[in-house]
Amino acid sequence: MPWRLLRPVVLVPAALVLTTLAASAEAGKSAGPSEFLLIVQIALLIAVGRGLGEIMQRIGQPSVIGELLAGIILGPSLFGWIWPEAQHAIFPNAPEQRAMIDGIAQVGILLLLLLTGMETDLKLVRKVGKAAIAISIAGIVVPFACGFALGEFLPDALLPNPQQRLVASLFMGTALSISSVKIVAVVVREMNFMRRNVGQIIVATAVIDDTIGWIIIAVIFSLASHGTLDIASVAKAVLGTLAFLAVSFTIGRRLVFQLIRWANDNLVSAAAVITVILLLMSVMAMITHLVGVHTVLGAFVAGVLVGESPILTRQIDERLRGLISSFFMPVFFGLAGLSADLSVLRDPDLLMLTGLLVVIASVGKFGGAFVGGTVGGLSTRESLALASGMNARGSTEVIIATIGLSIGVLSQNLFTMIVTMAIVTTMAMPPMLRAALARLPMNKEEKERLEREEFEKRGFVANLERPLLAVDESVNATFAARIAGLIAGMRGLPITVLHIGQRAKEQEKGRDEKDSHEAVVKKAAETVSINSAGDAGKFDVVTRTRQTELGATIADEARKGFDLLVVGIDRVTATKDRFDRRIDDIAAQFEGPLAIVAAKGRHLKQPMPDTLNILVPVSGSGVSKRGAEIAVALAQAGSGSLRVIYVATTRDKGAQRGASRGLSQETAILKDASDLAARYDVDITTTLRVNRAPEAAILREIDTTDVDLVVMGVDRIQADHLSFGGVADAVLRQSKVSVLLVSSGEVRQAPAEKA
């Protein structure tokens, strides 16, 4: 490896060691713990751990291996062997000094489990369902039995308390049967197999393994704390765990969502949502402790519930992960490495036992997963890939071993053996899994599913998370509520209704509850549930009322992370080719995508139509495709018809990018629209108009067909007021039917005038 890659890893710790040695004498004079030593310990673990983690990632290994190796290098295995005085000066065995960094490590365990839970995809588990459960059971039972048998035959010298051999054997069985979700998911994701059938089964099985493993660990913790097999205490732990899980995934799921949304929408302090997440983790960890099981189960479940929150923004997610990855992970895994004294493996007997442990762990897990995969209906190649992936213990194993050491189930030597096994199996997994996955063919059904998911990944509607509906008390507002409900109801998105009328609060109180905008939105969601098997049962609507000046109100809402603003007010347009001043004020304060609704024709008398007959103009541009996506979603949700029109003019020559090879520009654009509709089982009619002004062709199509809504994807044009260009303006003003303008969040330059 080039010296330039190794130099930062070597020079930074060296400088820190010299600094520590210069101050160690003074630190040693103090009778109590030294804050200076604590800082140096943390700095060393972070610098060396992150540096080695970087190198590990560059050679295709998980970064956690580098963090573990950092602890081994800085501990008695290497640094303490080469220069014991210096190592003892930096990492003294004084209980008070050790307790300081151990406290940080204990918090790190909870945060790591929180992060693991956030990365757990329960939808994926439900999707692969029975196969993953069957595979997981076989993949746990076989290595658990091997580990339990090994524990029963271990020499008494390796057990801290030979009288509690049953607890130690159960612990060994769990340690050998569990897999690391994080390591498995990282490798599968790196190879772009996360959405492949076998990739989903591998990750889902690892999730189930992890969950079952933590429950078993919680029960073993209860056993260890009582010293004997107390049936009453075990029953309390098991029943308490089941009750905790039941409440967490019913009432708890809803409560966590409500708390995160409340913090995101109401608290103005920095990182308020992260604070709430950490408090949730702490409370759930304390609950599991009171139940009689380990706090890690509470942290893990809290992470699962937080990860399922529909308004956990990417920014919040990245901040929390960054804190855990950059600080707590290198400290915790570094301490685990410090606790593992590999010098004991110079004893031939211990070395042989460690090798035997690695073989039993690998054969048991590999064999169990392979058998489970075969029984679960996987092919031989798929079963091999599954078995290769499930053999990685990684961070999960180290956490379990640390817990075992702290509660007195494992001796120091046994802890070192398990950490060694975790390192060996984790480093062996990536190349084995890559080799197994590279040989897997893709069938036709899987290929079609992957193409559909890849398309949706790039789409606008499929990536919506949280729409905002801004309305007054007009008929147009009711129609806008219907439109917003159909869009949000497709995926059960939480929606906020913002009343912006001058007397919104008084007028809304005076409305019948069944006629409120919230009721219209919910009814639209129910329509989606009936027509397209949507997720309306989980639909959530929140009401907000304008409290201040309109611009300030929109600005205050915009900071909460909405990714689509649907606007429905009485007056949409004004004179001189401009939007109403209120529309201008709203657009000026919201930088994301806008959907401006203008009810006309029959929708003024019937603002809650049962069906929508939609016309969508397309041009091949990105914003045009966004409008087509919205139109297809509305047609699917509203059980209406869909017409697509493309107007070919001389100005369009060469404008289309990415048209299919062998097709004309016009045919390619219409084919893209047809393919989009086909993916959602929506029937469409396509129309091609040549050498006409786009606005004239669109208006002509409106007059000669039975459409009642025009959906247009439009760009914001840079100007001193809100503008979407001449075509959108002409259609909005002259159309006899309702219009929905869907804009991007970007502003582009106005096109140059042609001579």
Image (tube, rainbow, N blue to C red):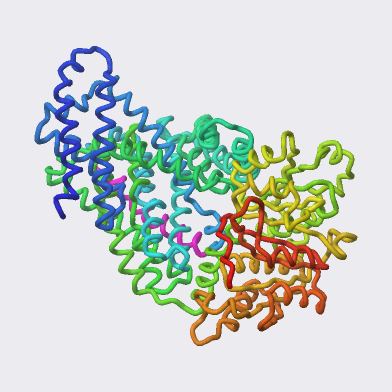
Q: Position of residue 136 (x, y in %)?
A: 45, 58
Magenta residues?
Answer: 130-156
User: Furthest residue to the bottom?
Assistant: 662
Give left or right: position of 89 versus 389.
Answer: left
Residue 61 placement (x, y as % from top left): 28, 55
One can see residue 30 in this view: yes
Residue that appears at 24% across and 57% down: 59
Front-most of residues 120 and 559: 559
Residue at 40% in and 77% down: 441
Q: Furthest residue to the left?
A: 82
Q: Nearer the viewer, residue 381 or 526?
A: 526
Total numbered circles: 0
Residue 165: x percent and y percent?
Answer: 33, 39
Does the rendering let one see residue 522? no
The quarter of the rendered structure image containing the C terminus is: bottom right
User: For this rendering, which residue is in front, 182 or 9?
Assistant: 9
- Does the magenta portion include 147? yes
Q: Is residue 691 left or right of residue 525?
A: left
Is residue 377 depicted above or below 327 in this figure? below
Image quadrant holding the N terminus, namely bottom left
From the viewer's perspective, tell me whether residue 632 is left or right of residue 68: right
Residue 456 magenta:
no
- Give the residue at x 76% y 77%: 701
The spot of residue 2 in percent (x, y) is 15, 54
In the displayed structure image, the side of residue 674 where residue 74 appears, left or right: left
